[in-house]
Amino acid sequence: MKEWHFRIGVHHLRGLITAEQAGQEYADLAEAVIAGLWPVVIEEFARKHGPIPGRGAVVLGMGSLGAQRLNAGSDLDLIMIYDAREADASEGPRPLATRPYFARLTQALVTAVTAPMSDGRLYEVDMRLRPSGRQGPVATSITSFRDYQQSEAWTWEHLALTRARPLVGEANLAEEVETFRQNLLKEKSAGAGIVSDVAEMRGRIAAAKHPLGVFDAKIGPGRLQDIELLSQTAALLSGVPVRRIEAQLAAGVASGWLDAADAAALSEAAELLWQVQAAARLLTGGELEADALGEAGRRFILRETGFETIEDLRRALETRSAEAAGIIDRQLAAGGPEGMDRDEG
């Protein structure tokens, strides 16, 4: 896996693939790793605790993995959903009740992905997007998942579902989860207060996280996280189950919530910011410090972004992020479709 990860980075550095293509390839590799580990983890776990009870389980990719765009340093956002049906426990040498069975199976998968090896971990795993967040169980039954999403989940959790994607697991259960996701997004699109919730959420994010500088492509007004928040809002308001930024913004245009010119400006800003983000993670493993880059690093990022000088790139980042932030400000202030938030109607 590390060899393939390295190869993607080399291809990106040499200009054989773009930042967008690299993002797709990193995501494809991560999915292949999960798909390869899943049957091995199940087999070893079943040897100790018995075969998976009921219908089995499905692992969902969330966040950037769900949207199929990772960078060289991305962790993996995962959740597990299972259906034990009528089974109370597994049948094996050391049987487990169904809830601890699936919780420990999830932990076994996470351990397989994150265990230190001679050439490092495969990936870091983040499960905070599971139902109820840090306080929730690491594996959730399909019944609890449905009930929670329909009656208890916050708007931010529905936003997260706009990018959820089944990766591995029992095929019929994966299809059922995806059908539920699509139906839920349609149902919640008519809900009240979505835009006001997002505006409040955006304010809390801004208060908690501050950009590290002009080359911080992720954090700050009009940066990637900000644009992603609006694109997910567009998808939720439209009730359309698309996962990527451009498709979500297009859904907002099709529903009449978002102006086509504004969507194009946001997409353009997101493309530049992703190019910088992908380059920064590949070159430094963290944020980009343009003044500390060597000549080769500067040539790489300028080739990627199409600018003549670092100063040109700096100005473009400032200009496009400011424009994106202004669009997001106006859009959230205007409320829901037809300029009115749904809790006012």
Image (cartoon, helix red, strand yellow):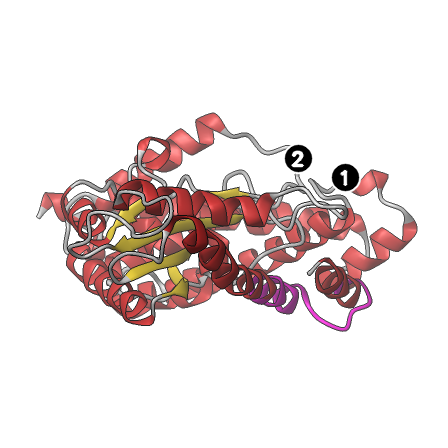
Work out which residue is located at the far left of the displayed protein and give it.
Answer: 345
Decide if residue 323 is on the left or right side of residue 248.
Answer: right
Going from N to C along the chain, the mark reached first, 1 or 2, is 2
Magenta span: chief secondary structure: helix
Q: Tell me where residue 116 sits by quadrant.
A: top right
Q: Tell me where residue 124 sits by quadrant.
A: top right
Disc 2 target residue: 213
- Asked whether disc 1 touches disc 2, contact meaning CB atoms under 8 Å apart, the reply is yes
| Residue 74 in view, yes or no | yes
Q: Which residues are magenta?
A: 12-28
Disc 1 target residue: 289
Decide if residue 151 is on the left or right side of residue 131.
Answer: left
Q: Give the percent coordinates (x, y) of residue 160.
A: 35, 50
Q: Tell which of 113 and 303 is nearer to you.
A: 113
Decide if residue 337 is on the left or right side of residue 18.
Answer: left
Task: Name the amino acid type tagged 1.
Answer: Glu
Q: Give the percent coordinates (x, y) of residue 138.
A: 36, 41
